[in-house]
Image: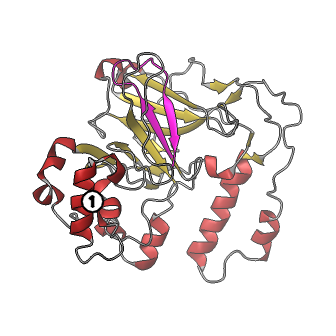
Amino acid sequence: MPRTTPPRPADVEALFPELGALRRSATRLHPRPGTPTVHDSSVGGPMLWPTGEPWPVCTIPHKRSSGYRYGDVLREREILDRAGRRDPRSGPNAEELAELAGFERGRHAPDLTDSDPIPLLAVAQLHRRDVPGLPFPEEGDLLQVFWCGYERHGESRHEPHVHLRRRHAADVTEPLSEQPVPGVVGREELVPSACVLHPEVVTEYPWFEELDPGLQERIERWAAPDGEEEDEVYVSDLSTAPGWKAGGHIAWNLTGPARLSCAACDADLFPLLTAAATEWDPSRTSWIPYEDRPGSAARRANTPTRVSPGRGRLIIAVCPRDPHHPLRLVTQ
């Protein structure tokens, strides 16, 4: 089933024509639980990965012997989903509760050293046919995204580690059938549930604080004409789409805007992919697709991937000049 975002509550370019020069296209991915194949675009699905090609691993030193068993994470979701389908009000039965009680964090991989290679998690696979705005077509028509099951990287030692792979899908003639997974992950919220995608192109505009001060004032006067408390209609309903998406603008709701420069060439980076805990803010309904309304259906659709990277939203920013330049991560 396709997903259709309702029209925006106002024609922002008609109100503020200068925003036309700042518009960008973004592809809302609309992940929903399903059973994607290696040939599909997906979140948390199997990768179109060649047999014989080494699977990406994390070798960055960090503690990796403790956490949650990967298999337990999937089994817990299976149990809870089954209980929800059976009777959302009663929850798991006694037998299921007993099994769930055994899924605890612990030192489940005591033999792993801090530098042993561990398989990266398959996060997303995007075909250009589904996401036409993917950059660097010469590098291939398929983007594959991986991350480590532990957020213990970077200068802060509290950041994820992301790996990108680009390839031509037609080159993979013998896909890998049994794909590696880590035995243990640091957080359950880093394991994406398998989701099929329903891509939809929408138009976005810059975050409010990135706009020229004069334009900010005009938008504020329009949003709150009687001098009342500032209305958030531009930020929440007119600028950036929530949820998983490719391209578009960054929503700087936690830190405020910051320049993202390439460490290799100083070019301004752009958001390649946004991974988000929720598909929309429950308090703002305008981004909920028509097909996911009303009520309980919307609540279930709002957390399809079960992931919550960083602070809840992770933006992978890349250099527009060279796909081999270092990426940067932004958590919001």
Residue 31 placement (x, y as % from top left): 42, 53
- Residue corresponding to mark 1: 238
Taking 244 as reference, is 59 left or right?
Answer: right
- Which secondary structure lies at badge 1? helix
**Amino acid tagged 1:** Leu
Q: In front here: 58 or 51?
A: 58
Residue 171: quadrant of the picture: top left
Residue 98: quadrant of the picture: bottom right
Q: Which residues are magenta?
A: 314-332
Taking 33 as reference, is 231 left or right?
Answer: left
Taking 211 as reference, is 268 left or right?
Answer: right
The quarter of the rendered structure image containing the N terminus is bottom left
Residue 160 placement (x, y as % from top left): 62, 37
| Res 46 visible | no
Taking 29 as reference, is 105 left or right?
Answer: right
Asked whether 133 falls inside the magenta stretch, the response is no
Q: Given the current orientation, which residue lies at the most extreme bottom position?
A: 89
| Res 222 visible | yes
Note whether 115 is above or below 42 in the view shown. Answer: above
Residue 30 placement (x, y as % from top left): 38, 54
